[in-house]
Amino acid sequence: MKVFYFSWQGLLALLLCLVAAFLLPLIATGTEDPISPGVTMLVFFLIIVSSILSQTTLPPAITAAILFIGAHEAAWLLLTGIAGNEGAARPSFFLLISAAWLLAWRCVSLLAGIQPSSTFTSWLLKLVIPAIFGAWILIIWEATTRGGGIPFILLPPPSAIGLRIVDSLPILAADVRQTILKAVVVGYIIGCSSGFIVAILADRVAFLRRGLIPIGNLVSALPIIGVAPVMVMWFGFDWQSKAAVVVIMTFFPMLVNTVAGLAAAGNMERDLMRTYASNYTQTLLKLRLPAAAPFIFNALKINSTLALIGAIVAEFFGTPIVGMGFRIAIEGGRMNVDMVWAEVAVAAVSGSVFYGVITLVERMTTFWHPSIRGS
């Protein structure tokens, strides 16, 4: 009976751990709060045991759980030990962080190979795997900035950004309300809906289709920094001018994608509708719009990111004393880089949630499409 299984991540992690043992200590001598020998031994124990168990033929779920605990507990101990000793990390510290990262890599590989037995398990894996991947981006970021002593003004550690977010929740909430709930949402709805309506008209009227598409390609190439000041002069400094920028940025992607989607229905299906004596409206509602649904949702997902970018950039050219773009510009000038990164993080999370909601709606409404059934 086979007991051991070859895992190159586990073997390499074990090798890095052994090399780090010869290069101790983890932090340069003479620091005020060095990592204690007990914590150091616990880190070595976690990595070595996890590396050995990664070579066994235990069930993948059990092995992944062991690797998850070992890798993240070791990383947590190392990061808490380097806090307050910025720039004092020795090569052994980075070797152990790398070993823990390899174990997390092996954990993700095992989770990705598990065949889900239920819908809940499938959704759980889809959440856990990206979460581990994202967590290790932050762990490596934290270890690099604190262990390498990177100046705060150049790149603050994620922990400092998170602390700034917690301390500035009222300010961030006001900025989100001004930028996203007003400018982005209003501009997104107007831009996408008007682009969809005009696409229906362009599909119905040939000269509109031939005239609007080239203009759409031209307008979509306009730089935001050229459009935003004009919209501010036209609509004022409040959120209405930013919504106008969002409308311009989202209108033509929706127009072009919807027109292309309406042309996606096959000739055989159209001939079948004609044999049923269907008029244009019936063919549009029952055949062509369902066939265009993937194109329309593709435009909605593209516009979800364009809308956020457009609103934030537009706020650089005039806004009341609130808004994400305003805050980034002001705090950047004051060298408060942690606040700038806090706004960037909130914008990234908001955009990801926006995109995820649209993707969820797409899966619920176009479950019949081959692109959804096969994913």
Image: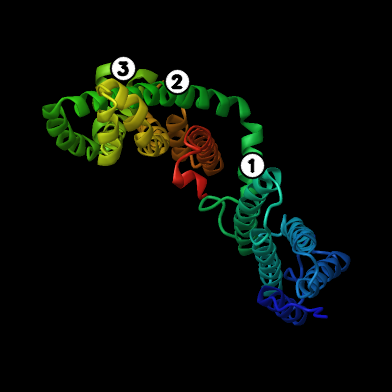
Residue at x 56% of width, y 42% of height: 338
**What color scheme is it?**
rainbow
Q: Nearer the viewer, mark 2 or mark 3?
A: 2
Relative to 348, 103 lies left or right: right
The residue at the far front in this view is 275
Depth order, front residue of 65/368: 368
- The residue carrying pointer 2 sits among few (fewer than 14), some (14 to 19) or many (20 or more) residues within 10 Å by Cα, namely some
Kindly state the secondary structure of the residue where label 3 is placed: loop
Tell me, for residue 162, which label it has, or none.
1
Q: Earlier in the sequence, mark 2 or mark 1?
A: 1
* Residue that numbered label 2 is attached to: 182
Kindly state the secondary structure of the residue where label 2 is placed: helix
Q: Position of residue 120 (x, y in %)?
A: 70, 43
Instruction: State if disc 1 and disc 2 touch (CB < 8 Å).
Output: no
* Residue that numbered label 3 is attached to: 236
Depth order, front residue of 150/239: 239
Report which quarter residue 274 is drawn in.
Answer: top left
Vertical side of 196 occupied by 341: above or below = below
Q: Position of residue 355 (x, y in %)?
A: 49, 37
Whether residue 318 appears in this view of the structure is: no
Residue at x 68% of width, y 52% of height: 116
Whether residue 246 appears in this view of the structure is: yes
Q: Position of residue 115 (x, y in %)?
A: 67, 57
Q: Position of residue 196 (x, y in %)?
A: 31, 26
Residue at x 51% of width, y 27% of height: 176
- The residue carrying pointer 1 sits among few (fewer than 14), some (14 to 19) or many (20 or more) residues within 10 Å by Cα, namely some
